[in-house]
């Protein structure tokens, strides 16, 4: 059974992985034997994350590029495959959040959310999938959200972007599954992370969350590792177009 989750010899690119949940998932894949490629816009932050992984005895390298820039994405994927080898796993994790009432939401921040959360998934997946098709194998994991299914005040553009990522996942599955490429999504519930720090520190919100979630607590970042490993490994070879909610039961509860 352990072979079902062994990632030895696999190479994984995780976008937006210099910190937070992205870095935790990268760590989980590396702990199972994968060589992970850390991505972010800052080369310095990529190298800091790489050093932390290497100090733990894990295989990691960095590749800084802007996931919203089509030319930068194309050049980076070409370079990675030429210098490091084929990408077996892609985790589209890069994401941003802004909060404003819908009627007051700045257009510049709407554009930023759509570009980072949605457009980048298309751009990076397209470049990686072309090469996976030739090899007739690959795993693509898109980071969705509770807001792929549920709305919440002040984050309507975020919910729109994550709903789009859900449908990108399903559409990519339909087109790529015939080439032995599995495309799935992970939808985290409410995790204690950098992106949710303001909510974690809001006593009223935390009390509401614990009452709303059957598990009665925030998620721990390391609890995403297993989902990322499962969808990256042989264990999920016939799982396709699926959105795996890691939410403590929130979506199941009314």
Image (spheres, rainbow, N blue to C red):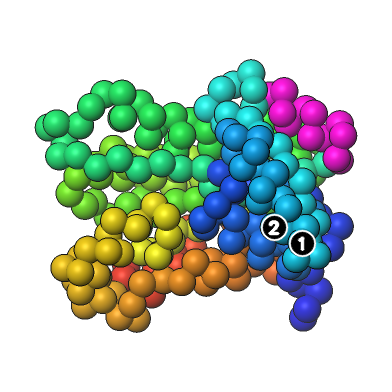
Which quadrant of the structure image shows residue 208? bottom left
Q: Is residue 68 above or below residue 230?
A: above
Q: Is 75 covered by the magenta stretch?
A: yes
Q: Residues within 10 Å of mark 1 (few under 14, many from 20)?
A: few
* Range shown magenta: 74-85
Q: In screen coordinates, is 171 left or right of 188?
A: right
Q: Is residue 189 left or right of residue 133?
A: left
* Circles 2 and 1 in contact, beta carbons < 8 Å: yes
Position above or below: 190 against 99 = below
- Depicted 174 relative to depicted 150: above or below: above
Location of mark 1 (residue) = 55
Quadrant where the image shows the C terminus: bottom left
Residue 62 image point, x, y percent:
72, 42
Q: Residue at x 66, y 51 (%)?
A: 49
Magenta stretch, main secondary structure, is: helix
Instruction: Classify residue 71 by image quadrant.
Output: top right
Badge 2 is on which residue? Answer: 52
SS of the residue under disc 1: helix
Residue 148 position, x and y percent, is 36, 51
């Amino acid at each position: 059974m352990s072979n079902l989750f062994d990632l030895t010899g696999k190479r994984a690119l995780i976008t937006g992985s210099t910190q937070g949940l992205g870095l935790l998932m990268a760590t989980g894949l590396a702990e199972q034997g994968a060589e992970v490629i850390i991505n972010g816009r800052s080369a310095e932050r990529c190298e800091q994350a790489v050093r932390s992984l290497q100090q733990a005895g894990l295989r990691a390298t960095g590749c800084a590029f802007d996931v919203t820039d089509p030319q930068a994405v194309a050049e980076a994927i070409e370079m990675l495959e030429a210098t490091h080898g084929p990408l077996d796993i892609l985790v589209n994790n890069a994401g941003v959040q802004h909060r404003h009432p819908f009627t007051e939401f700045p257009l510049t921040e709407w554009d930023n959310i759509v570009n980072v959360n949605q457009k980048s998934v298309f751009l990076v997946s397209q470049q990686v999938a072309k090469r996976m098709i030739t090899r007739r194998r690959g795993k693509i994991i898109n980071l969705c959200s509770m807001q792929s299914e549920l709305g919440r005040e002040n984050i309507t553009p975020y919910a729109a972007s994550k709903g789009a990522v859900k449908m990108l996942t399903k559409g990519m599955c339909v087109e790529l599954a015939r080439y032995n490429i599995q495309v799935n999504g992970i939808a985290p519930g409410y995790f204690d992370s950098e992106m949710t720090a303001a909510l974690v520190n809001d006593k009223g919100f935390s009390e509401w969350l614990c009452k709303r979630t059957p598990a009665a607590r925030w998620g721990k970042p390391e609890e995403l590792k297993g989902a990322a490993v499962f969808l990256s490994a042989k264990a999920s070879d016939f799982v396709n177009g699926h959105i795996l909610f890691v939410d403590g039961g929130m979506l199941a509860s009314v």
